[in-house]
Amino acid sequence: MRTKAWVSYLLACSGLLLIPLVGLNYIHLNQDTGTAYSLMTDLDRQIPFIKGFVVPYLGWYGFLAVGFLYLAYRDRSNYFQTLVEFIIGLLLCYGVYAIYQTTVPRPDLAGSDWLLRTVQWVYSSDEPFNCFPSTHVLTAYLMMRAYLRSVPIAIRYKIITAGTAVLIIASTLFVKQHVIMDIVGAVLVAECVVYVVSKSKRAWSIGSIAAGARQDELERGLKQ
């Protein structure tokens, strides 16, 4: 029985491979197309660069991995719903990048400590495009929403997940990878996707129950 459970769990987790597969579009779109808009506001210019926030910024990778793996173990239905939300949300963001490319100016870095070197690595690894909406924010926010709506997950894990997600979202501003509008856009996309997927899931569940009831009535009629 335990072997079957592990096989089922691993098969469910294999669906996570869809995320890097879809992410190949990001690499293709993350380049200068000749026209890139800036959504920076005066408020963004007042937000300081804080090198220490590169830690939660990169911690995003582990956050999503652990979040998905535990969700698949503890709340399988919610896991699949969240995975669908991720795929749809990412595709919507990539669609925006394809038709409305934005950029964020980066600060000149002075110093050579490990935090600044890490920020420099981030800058060299990720071109300053594909900014609006932020996929960093989109995915962190969707993971937070998944945990907050889960019934089986303990409240302490919900608090940890929400706090970490907020820290990651803030880090996109403090390491100057995104601006406020990038965050607003990502949250709006996430909320729209959650609404549509939740409504579709509810409609499908109701349809399945109705179909099952009709099947039971038909079988009872045949037995009479």
Image: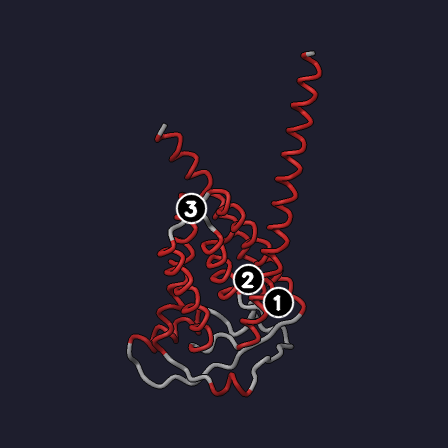
Q: Residue at x 64, y 53 (%)?
A: 196
Please tell me which residue lies in front, 101 or 137.
137
Residue position for label 3: 152
Secondary element under disc 2, as helix, strand or loop, is helix
Mark 3 surroundings within 10 Å by alpha-carbon count, few (fewer than 14), some (14 through 19), many (20 or more) = few
Q: Residue 177, relative to residue 223: is it above or below?
A: below
* Relative horizontal placement of residue 73, taking residue 188 as reference (left or right): left
Count of residue discs: 3
Q: Residue 72, relative to residue 35: is it above or below?
A: above
* Relative horizontal placement of residue 40, taking residue 224 as reference (left or right): left
Q: Viewer-nearest of labels 3 and 2?
A: 3
- Of the 4 image quadrants, the one containing the C terminus is top right
For residue 59, which quarter of the picture?
Answer: bottom left
Q: Amino acid at mark 2?
A: Tyr
Mark 3 and mark 1 lie on one chain; the one further toward the N terminus is: 1
Whole-percent x, y for residue 21 in the image: 53, 51
Q: Residue at x 45, y 54 (%)?
A: 147
Residue position for label 2: 26
Are the residues tagged 2 and 1 within 8 Å (C-beta)?
yes
Q: Amino acid at mark 3?
A: Pro
Mark 1 surroundings within 10 Å by alpha-carbon count, few (fewer than 14), some (14 through 19), many (20 or more) = many
Residue position for label 1: 97
Secondary element under disc 1, as helix, strand or loop, is helix
Q: Residue furthest top?
A: 224
Mark 2 and mark 1 lie on one chain; the one further toward the N terminus is: 2
Q: Residue furthest left?
A: 113
Q: Amino acid at mark 1?
A: Tyr
